[in-house]
Image (spheres, rainbow, N blue to C red):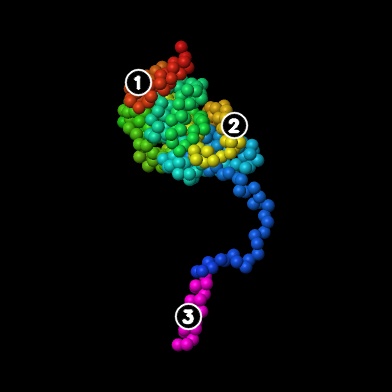
C-alpha cells in the first residue's frame, strides 16, 4: 500500500510539473543550425494560380509565361505555383477559392463570371465578334474596362483578359450545317443565361457541367455535344467521343485574370508594378499566339482523329445570325444598355461590307 502511495505521488508530481512548465520537447537540444536555404525565405511571396485547362492550351502556356516573367523580374522573390487541369478546384469552385484566400490567382472563362456579374454576359453574345481584332477591341477597350470595374466591388481584383479562341460545335449525332440541324440535341455548356438562350434559339437543350467532367458526360451520352475552342477539344480529347465538328466561330471564349484583392493590397508597390508589367507582356504574348495554337490543334484534329470537320460558309453563317437575333433581345433584360451599344458598334465596325 505504501509503495502504491509513493508511486502515485511521483506520477502526480510529474504531471503537475509538466502542466506547469509545459511539454517543451525542444528543451535540452542544441540551437537550430544555420541553413542558407532559409535565407530571405520570409520575404518570399507565393502566388497559387489555379485553372482548369490543359498545359498545352493558350491559357496553360500563358500561365507558365506569366510565372516565368514574374519570377525572373523579382529574382524569385515572387514564386508562381500553377495548378492546371482543375487539380485544385473545379471551375464552379474557383471564385470561392479565390475570395476565401485558398488560392491567390484564377483565370476563369469570362462566361463563368456571368452569373455573379450579369454584364459579363455581353462577351458571350453569338456572332458578336466578326474577327480577332473585334475581340481585342472589346477586351482591351471600353467594354473590358467597365467589366473589370464591376469586379472592384468584390474580393477579386481584375488584372486583365487573356485570349483563347472562337467556339466550335461538336456532337455525335449528325453534321451541323444549318441551324435546324441543332433540333432536339442536348449540349454541355458553361454557365450563363446568354449561352442558354443561344441554344434555345435553335431548339437545343443544355446542361451546365464542369469543364473537366465534360469528357465523361460525352462518353456516357448524357450530352450529345458541346461547344469549345479547338485547343480545348483537342487537349481534352473530346474528339474521341464526338463524330462531327463544325467550324462555326459563333462565339468567343477568353479569360478574366483575377487576383485576390486582400493579397494584392498587401503586396509592395514594386511587386504590384512587376505583376502588372508581366501581365501586360503575357497578354501581348497570348494575343499573338492563341490564334496559331488553335489553328495547329485543328490541323492535329484533321491529321490524327476521325472527327469529320465542316466549315460554315458566310451564307450559312447569315442564317445562324438570323436565328440568334432573339438572344440580343433577351440580353436587354440583364446587360447595361451602354455595353450593348458598344458591342453593336464593334460588331458593325469589323463586319466586312
Ligand atoms: C470550358 O469550361 O469549356 C472552358 O472554360 C475551359 C477553359 O477554361 O478554357
Residue 8: image tag: 3
Q: Which residues are magenta?
A: 1-18
Picture coordinates of residue 158, whole percent (x, y): 49, 33
User: In this figure, which residue is indicated by the disc labeled 1?
Assistant: 325
User: In this figure, which residue is indicated by the disc labeled 2?
Assistant: 277
> Taking 197 as reference, is 97 above or below it?
below
Q: Nearer the viewer, residue 235 or 149?
A: 149
Query: Residue placed farthest to the bottom in the image?
Result: 1
> Taking 16 as reference, is 345 above or below it?
above
Q: Is residue 82 magenta?
A: no
Q: Nearer the viewer, residue 326 or 342?
A: 342
Give the Cα distance between marks 1 and 2.
40 Å
Q: Which comes before the other along the chain, label 2 or label 3?
A: 3
Give the Cα distance between marks 2 and 3.
70 Å
> Residue at the location (43% across, 42% down)?
96
Kindly check if marks 1 and 2 are in contact, taking CB atoms under 8 A apart as contact.
no
Q: Nearer the viewer, residue 189 or 23?
A: 23
Q: Is residue 10 magenta?
A: yes
Q: Give the quarter of the image for residue 119.
A: top left
Q: Is residue 37 visible?
A: yes
Amino acid at each position: 500500500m505504501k509503495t502504491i502511495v509513493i508511486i502515485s505521488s511521483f506520477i502526480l508530481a510529474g504531471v503537475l510539473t509538466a502542466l506547469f512548465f509545459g511539454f517543451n520537447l525542444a528543451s535540452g537540444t542544441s540551437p537550430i543550425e544555420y541553413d542558407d536555404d532559409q535565407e530571405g525565405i520570409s520575404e518570399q511571396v507565393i502566388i497559387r494560380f489555379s485553372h482548369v485547362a490543359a498545359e498545352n492550351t493558350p491559357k496553360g502556356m500563358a500561365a507558365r509565361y506569366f510565372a516565368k516573367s514574374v519570377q525572373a523580374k523579382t529574382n524569385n522573390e515572387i514564386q508562381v505555383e500553377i495548378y492546371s487541369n482543375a487539380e485544385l478546384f473545379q471551375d464552379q469552385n474557383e471564385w470561392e477559392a479565390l475570395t476565401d484566400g485558398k488560392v491567390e490567382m484564377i483565370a476563369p472563362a469570362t462566361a463563368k463570371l456571368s452569373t455573379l456579374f450579369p454584364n459579363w454576359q455581353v462577351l458571350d453574345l453569338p456572332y458578336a465578334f466578326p474577327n480577332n481584332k473585334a475581340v481585342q477591341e472589346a477586351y482591351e477597350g471600353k467594354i473590358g474596362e467597365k467589366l473589370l470595374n464591376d469586379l472592384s466591388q468584390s474580393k477579386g481584383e481584375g488584372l486583365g483578359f487573356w485570349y483563347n479562341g472562337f467556339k466550335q460545335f461538336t456532337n455525335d449525332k449528325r453534321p451541323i450545317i444549318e441551324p435546324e440541324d441543332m433540333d432536339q440535341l442536348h449540349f454541355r455548356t458553361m454557365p450563363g443565361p446568354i449561352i442558354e438562350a443561344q441554344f434555345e434559339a435553335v431548339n437545343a437543350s443544355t446542361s451546365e457541367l464542369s469543364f473537366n467532367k465534360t469528357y465523361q458526360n460525352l462518353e456516357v451520352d448524357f450530352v450529345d455535344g458541346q461547344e469549345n475552342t479547338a485547343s480545348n477539344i483537342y487537349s481534352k480529347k473530346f474528339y474521341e467521343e464526338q463524330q462531327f465538328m463544325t467550324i462555326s466561330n459563333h462565339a468567343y471564349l477568353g479569360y478574366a485574370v483575377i487576383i485576390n484583392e486582400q493579397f494584392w493590397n498587401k503586396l509592395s508597390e514594386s511587386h504590384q508594378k512587376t505583376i502588372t508589367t508581366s501581365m501586360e507582356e503575357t497578354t501581348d504574348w497570348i494575343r499573338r499566339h492563341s490564334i496559331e495554337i488553335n489553328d495547329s490543334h485543328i490541323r492535329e484534329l484533321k491529321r490524327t482523329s476521325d472527327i469529320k470537320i465542316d466549315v460554315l460558309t458566310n451564307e450559312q453563317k447569315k442564317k445562324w445570325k438570323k436565328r440568334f437575333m432573339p438572344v440580343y433581345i433577351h440580353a436587354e433584360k440583364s446587360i447595361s444598355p451602354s455595353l450593348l451599344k458598344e458591342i453593336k458598334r464593334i460588331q458593325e465596325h469589323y463586319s466586312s461590307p
